[in-house]
Amino acid sequence: MAFIKEESEDLKIEDTFTVKHEDAEQHTAAPVHLTGLKEECEAVTVAQEKNQNDKHSASEEKVAYYPQPYKRRGPYKLKPYNFIRYICQHCGKEFSQNGNLQAHIRIHTGEKPFSCKLCDKSFTQKSHLQIHLRAHVEGMSFTCQHCGRHFTQKNAFMVHLKVHTADRSKTCKTCGKTFSRSANLLEHVRVHTGARPFGCQHCGKTFAKKTTLRNHTKIHTGEKPYRCPYCGKGFIQPTNYKVHIKTHTGEMRFCCQECGKGFEHQGKLTTHMLIHSGEKPYACAQCGSRFRLKGALAGHMNVHTLERAPPSASSVDARSAVKAA
C-alpha cells in the first residue's frame, strides 16, 4: 500500500501534460484541452485519497483512455503538376487541351467539318451545329416582336431585346442620333468634331478609335498573327484574313493586293481600290466637291436641290437633316 501511495504522489499534472503534449505533436486530430485535463487529474487524486484500492484501477483507465497516435510512414511529398501547353502555329495562342487547339486552328484554316444535313450550312464546332439544328427541330422559337427577327437561343434573344428596350437617353446634339451608352455617344461625336485623340508613338498618326490605333501599331511592330495556310501571307486583322482564305477556296475570286480583301466581282474590286489610291473620280459640277462613289455624289446633289427650293419650314428641316448626315 505504501508503494502505491508513493506512486500516486509522483503522478503530477505536469507529467500528465507532458505525455498528452507529445500526443498532440504526433496526432493533430485530437487537440489538448488543458483545463479539462487538470480537472480529470484532480478527480483522480481525490478518488485515490478515499480509496487506495480504486486508485490503481482508475489510473489504468486514465491511461487506456487515450488512443495510440497515428504515425505516418514518411513525409508528405507534393508532386508537381505538369502544365502542358498546346500552341497555335499560326498566331501563337496557347491552350491547355489539345481539343481546344484543334477547334481554334479551324479559325485560321476556315475548315467547317460539321455540316447540317437539312440545309447547306456548316460549322467549325459541333456545339454550333447542335444549336443550329434547333432552328429545324423546334422552328425558330424566339421571335422579336419589334423587328420580327428570329433566334434559336433564349440568351441571344434577350440580348437582342435590349436594342429595342434599352434607355437611349444619350443623344447626339449635332444629328440627333441616340445611344444607350455614354461611351458609344462619345465615340460617335468624334465623327462630327473630327477629334482623333489616339496617336501612334511611332509615326504620330492619330485615330478616333483606340482599336484602330492598336491595329495600326502592328504595322510598325511587324506583327501579323493571322497567317494563310495556303500561301503563307500574314494579316494584321482577322477579318482580312478570313476574306483572303476565301480566295483560295474559290468563294472570293478577286483579291485586293493591298489589304487582302476579296470580292466576287471585278467591279467591286475596282471600286475598292479607290480607297487605297485616294482617287475620287466623281465631281460635283456646282461646287467642285469630289466623291469616290457615284451614290455619294447623288446624295450630295440633294443639298443643292434643297437650296433652290422655296424656303419653308419643311425644307429647312430637311436641309438640316442632310447636312447633319
Image (cartoon, rainbow, N blue to C red):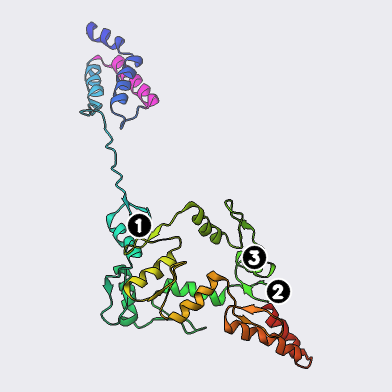
Magenta span dominant secondary structure:
helix
- Distance from Cα at disc 2 to Cα at disc 3: 12 Å
- Which residues are drawn in magenta? 33-52
Residue 247: say if magenta: no
Q: Which residue is mark 2?
A: 174
Closer-to-camera residue (270/20): 270
| Disc 3 crowd, CA 10 A, few/some/many (<14, 14-19, 20+) | few
Question: Which quarter of the image is occupied by the C terminus?
Answer: bottom right
Q: Position of residue 296 (x, y in %)?
A: 60, 82
Q: Is residue 305 left or right of residue 219?
A: right
**Residue bearing the label numbered 3:** 186
Q: Could you tell whether 233 is left or right of 310 in the image?
A: left
Closer-to-camera residue (75/160)? 160
**Which amino acid, by three-letter code, is at mark 2?**
Thr
Say what secondary structure mark 2 lies in.
Answer: loop
193 above or below 206? Answer: below
Q: Quadrant of the N terminus?
A: top left
In which quadrant of the rendered view does residue 324 lie? bottom right
Q: How many marks?
A: 3
* Disc 1 target residue: 90
CA separation, marks 1 and 3? 36 Å
First in sequence: mark 2 vs mark 3: 2
Contact? badges 1 and 3 (CB < 8 Å): no
**For the residue marked with disc 3, what is the amino acid?**
Leu
- Tell me the number on the disc at residue 259: none
Residue 247, quarter of picture: bottom left
Q: Residue 73's spot in the image, x, y percent?
A: 20, 28
Q: Residue at x 32, y 15 (%)?
A: 15
- Secondary element under disc 3, as helix, strand or loop, is helix
Earlier residue among tags 1 and 3: 1
Residue at 75% in and 92% down: 309
Q: Quadrant of residue 261?
A: bottom left
